[in-house]
Image (cartoon, grey):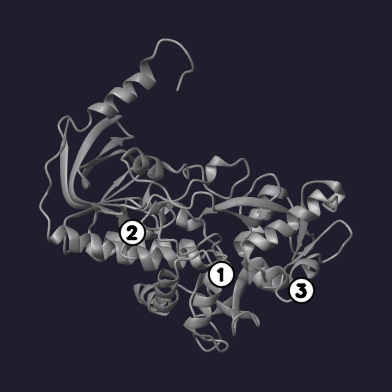
Amino acid sequence: MSVIKHDVVIIGAGLAGSLAAAQLAGKYDVAVLAKCYPAQSHSCAAQGGIAAALGNLEEDNEHWHWFDTVKGGDYLVDQDAAKILAYEAPEMIYEMEHMGCPFSRTAEGKIAQRKFGGHTRNYGEKPVLRACFSADRTGHALLHTAFEQLVKHGVHVYPEWYCVDLLVEDGVCRGLVAWNMRDSELHVFHTKAVMFATGGGGQAFLITSNAFANTGDGLVVAYNAGVPLQDMEFFQFHPTGIWKRGILLTEGCRGEGGTLVNDKGERFMEKYSPKLMELAPRDLVTRSITTEILEGRGIGGRDYVYLDMRHLGAKKIMERLPDVHSFIMTYLGIDCIDKPVPIQPTAHYMMGGIPCDVHGQVKTGGAKDKDVAGFFAAGECSCVSVHGANRLGTNSLLDIVVFGKRAGVHAGEYAAGAGHPELPEDPAGAVARMLEDLAGHPEGERA
């Protein structure tokens, strides 16, 4: 069995993983391992925007953003982490812009900003224009910008490789075992540091906005290596998934002025959040929609309500929400320019995950909290607890650029001061036996 050596191996080639690798390129022997081609990672599905208090269109500041993040997470947020998120946001937006990210622009050429649920001015006074965006394909623009950096710097990428096991012994991460999906061969990666950026696990739910690849693999691998998981009870449902499909219709639909309507034609958010209306935090809007459905006010008594964007007009919809228009046409056969759209809440985002600090250093948690030396995590698979019980829209892309960069930098610093730790005896033996058992048992259910 081959043993492949690198200083740092990053598992996951989405925005967090690609941006982390870009920090290390040229300084360390870094490799990225991903079960799909990097440009197809789920970060490209993020639509509506990335939060930063730039104040390009109206007054805004980082302290208001910090407050909104803490309040939106039901005050179960790590407030120091939330402060880092809010205060480093403008710097990261400009860094991504300078890498070439094609943000939408104002008439003066500034980065355009739109409203998003839970983001307010003056501590909840009214919604604020804070979400920077690239039409309704912001994640796509950011991911491809980061991936271009990997190509530019010649980072070694292993596409269609699957991490099966993490080699942790005596509190030190010594590498990993990966399966080459193209030829079904197992390989051991001997590393100084490993970073997980493996994304979420929305496929645990029947109705989800997550891609088929989002099966929570990274969390299982970390858990099997003895790392506890944190805040797993906090799973966010996005209010506006396409009925029956769960495919996301960005919060930008409501940020641009779309409204939610029940069977009686009522704009029902007036009852639940008269000040913020459709731009209330996602958990509140989701509960409101669910209440309407359970009390019999779904459209025709069924399990959906309408998202109405007809009043926005064709020009605005095609300029600001072209992908949304296309998704609705593809999956429902409805033109949202002249018809309301059936929507229902969809499983969207995991607040919990692998516990780590603001530098991405993975912790063991509990009373005897310790570092897992050489193991780092960032993005949706991690839990810095920056989102608490509920993430604000546009804070996820921000989370993965802010903490993805930080985790990459600190993984590099750790690797610079460490040698390759000794591999365990027979490092891939347990995995090989497991796979043989899955493929070869003579009776019972076939894998």
Q: Mark 2 points at which residue?
A: 18
Query: Tag 1: residue type?
Result: Ala
Quadrant location of the C terminus in the rendered image: top left
The answer to whether residue 133 shows anywhere in this view is: no
Spatial separation of the CA atoms under disc 1 and disc 3: 28 Å
Badge 3 crowding class, 10 Å Cα cut-off, few under 14, some 14 to 19, many 20 or more, is: few
Q: Mark 3 points at which residue?
A: 274
Relative to 245, residue 47 above or below:
below
Spatial separation of the CA atoms under disc 2 and disc 3: 41 Å
Does residue 293 appear to the left or right of 92 in the view shown? right
Does residue 379 appear to the left or right of 305 in the view shown? left
The answer to whether residue 227 shows anywhere in this view is: yes
State the residue lying farthest toward the right: 264
Residue at image coords 83%, 58%: 262
Q: Which of 70 and 159 is in front in this view?
A: 70
Q: Could you tell me which secondary element the residue under label 3 belongs to?
A: loop
From the top left corner, tell me how far across and down residue 292 is, in percent: 80, 55
Q: Could you tell me which secondary element the residue under label 1 belongs to?
A: loop
From the top left corner, tell me how far across and down residue 306 is, in percent: 78, 58
Relative to 368, residue 140 above or below:
below
Relative to 405, residue 348 above or below:
above
Query: Tag 2: residue type?
Result: Ser
Q: Name the residue under label 1.
A: 135
Q: Nearer the viewer, residue 349 or 305?
A: 349
Query: Tag 3: residue type?
Result: Pro
Residue at image coords 55%, 84%: 106
Does residue 15 appear to the left or right of 345 in the view shown? left
Quadrant location of the N terminus in the rendered image: top left
| Label whose residue precedes the other's in the sequence (1 or 3) | 1
| Label whose residue precedes the other's in the sequence (2 or 3) | 2
